[in-house]
Image (tube, rainbow, N blue to C red):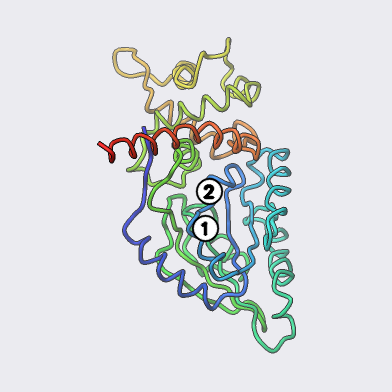
Amino acid sequence: MSIQWFPGHMTSARRKAAETMARTDVVIEVLDARIPEASCNPMIRELREFRQRPCLKILNKTDLADPEATRAWLAYYDRQPGVKAVALSCKKPGDVARVPRLAQALAPHRNDGTKPLRLMIMGIPNVGKSTLMNALLNRRVAKVGDEPAVTKSQQTFDLGEHMTVTDTPGMMWPKIDHDSDGFMLAACHAIGRNAVIDEEVAAFLGTILLARYPQELAARYRFKAPPADGHAVVEEVARRRGCLLKGGGLDLEKAAGLLLTDFRAGAIGRISLETPDTRVAMLAAAAPAVVKGTAEEESDADE
């Protein structure tokens, strides 16, 4: 199963973002701390690199992520030129108060008070961009919600005397290249419900939890023995939580929803679905498949 999701309004959002980028000094890219690179939109990287704009990467929802994995991601991003990474929760005013100063440090040429520092908040849907915007302004100016793609248009506000900030709609990219990225995005609720099957996403999540967080998983659901695989995790959750259909069968759809809800709320523990090391391993494993696919295409063309 491959997960793809690119609502029509995102094409115009991308075009508008490119226009605004030309008038922006610093890009603030909000990522999900549980899946930093999977939630990093390659179109945003292309836009800011084309304009040579520095980037403050905010790993949001850090209170839900594995602290050790988050530290590894911060080091990973801080090694990139023109990038500063910070882990915080956009729901905590004290955390958000650090953002203007960090952004200012990335554009010292706009620090003389004669021209405002122009910030642009970007990211995929449902990572907390609007929550960040509201916290920066200390008032509700952007609509927030627990569903992806709540924000549909750009908004610009003054942030103090010498700073402006523009909030942008969440942007996906036309094709998610790696299946695991699609599943991680879906597990973190960055993909619209109509594009996913909860049972498959929950089984994917269960596989990762079994491999990396078996104790947290067992403690949450009181497993008597480790399930065999991700699908077995969903089945065991159904048994332990009494998710039954009429006739006594397991209600796997309900169990999948429970597992995903618990993960998203942090009820299982502080969980990260990827680290820099697992990312490297995933890309290395995917490389032979890409080479094979390219070779097959060339062979077909020759015939």
Q: Residue furthest left?
A: 303
Quarter location, residue 214: top right
Q: Measuring 42% from the left and 53% from the top, which residue is drawn there? A: 173
Quarter of the picture containing the C terminus is top left
Q: Is residue 182 above or below residue 10?
A: above
Judged left or right of residue 80, residue 2 is left
User: Could you give the CA–CA distance between mark 1 and mark 2, rounded to whole angstroms?
Assistant: 8 Å
Residue 121, image x, y percentages: 55, 65
What is the crowding at mark 1: few (fewer than 14 residues within 10 Å), some, or many (at least 20)? many
- Labelled disc at residue 53: none
Residue 266, image x, y percentages: 60, 37
Quarter location, residue 10: bottom left
Asked whether disc 1 touches disc 2, contact meaning CB atoms under 8 Å apart, the reply is yes
What's under tag 2, amino acid-wise?
Answer: Ser
What's under tag 1, amino acid-wise?
Answer: Gly
Judged left or right of residue 298, residue 286 is right
Q: Which residue is mark 1?
A: 123
Q: Which residue is mark 2?
A: 39
Q: Is residue 63 above or below residue 179?
A: below
Judged left or right of residue 267, residue 86 is right
What is the crowding at mark 2: few (fewer than 14 residues within 10 Å), some, or many (at least 20)? many
In this rendered view, identify the residue nearer to me: 301 or 42. 301
